[in-house]
Image (cartoon, rainbow, N blue to C red):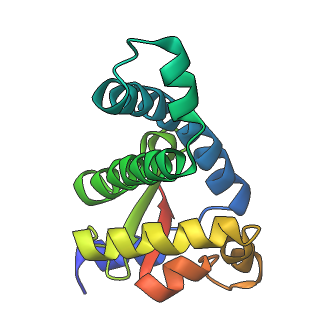
Amino acid sequence: MSTSSVSTIETTPPRLWRRFAAMLYDLFPLIGLWIIGSAVWMLAFHRGDNLQQLASAVRDPLDLALRDLWLLILAAAYFVASWTRVGATIGMRAWKLKLVRGDGARIGFRIALLRFVLASLSLVILGCGFWYAWFDADRRTWHDRVCGTRMMRL
């Protein structure tokens, strides 16, 4: 048996409140990223020469939808890069959590992207995928089960 699989088995899964604390902590870098992303969006598409023109452009539903899609892409980049490079986001590191595959190895790009999409859907549906961890013996969320990942406490 390899060392990485032994550490995965011997490590107790984190409690759900720790995961929620890490998610709350991750809001802070996300908000900063979204502020910078919004500023880049405004500079790229609405130069801001005329405040009246800028105010009317901000109310355009298509512009809002595209900007929100841009911010979602930035959030996905933050999570996917963090999970694939380090195995943890800033919030997860603060709460001593790490995301790994079932065998204890680091997750790849496709799995990280799928996990982000499923976790986002889970949040939209009132966090149902996260609440699933309360009833799961291994405390794995629905998106962890589907993606074959698990959260470890370091």
Tell me what residue is drawn at x 23 percent, y 53 percent.
Answer: 85
Estimate the x, y position of residue 24 in percent, counting from the top left. 64, 42
Please tell me in which quadrant of the rendered image residue 6 appears.
bottom left
Q: Is residue 127 above or below residue 40?
A: below
Q: Is residue 148 left or right of residue 109?
A: right
Q: Is residue 51 visible?
A: yes
Please tell me in which quadrant of the rendered image residue 87 appears.
bottom left
Tell me what residue is drawn at x 44 percent, y 12 percent.
Answer: 50
Q: Quadrant of the N terminus?
A: bottom left
Q: Is residue 117 above or below residue 25?
A: below
Q: Is residue 126 left or right of residue 152?
A: right
Tell me what residue is drawn at x 77 percent, y 68 percent.
Answer: 126
Nearer to us in this view, 126 or 50 = 50
Estimate the x, y position of residue 29 in percent, counting from the top left. 47, 33
Q: Is residue 96 visible?
A: no
Estimate the x, y position of residue 131 in percent, counting from the top left. 75, 73
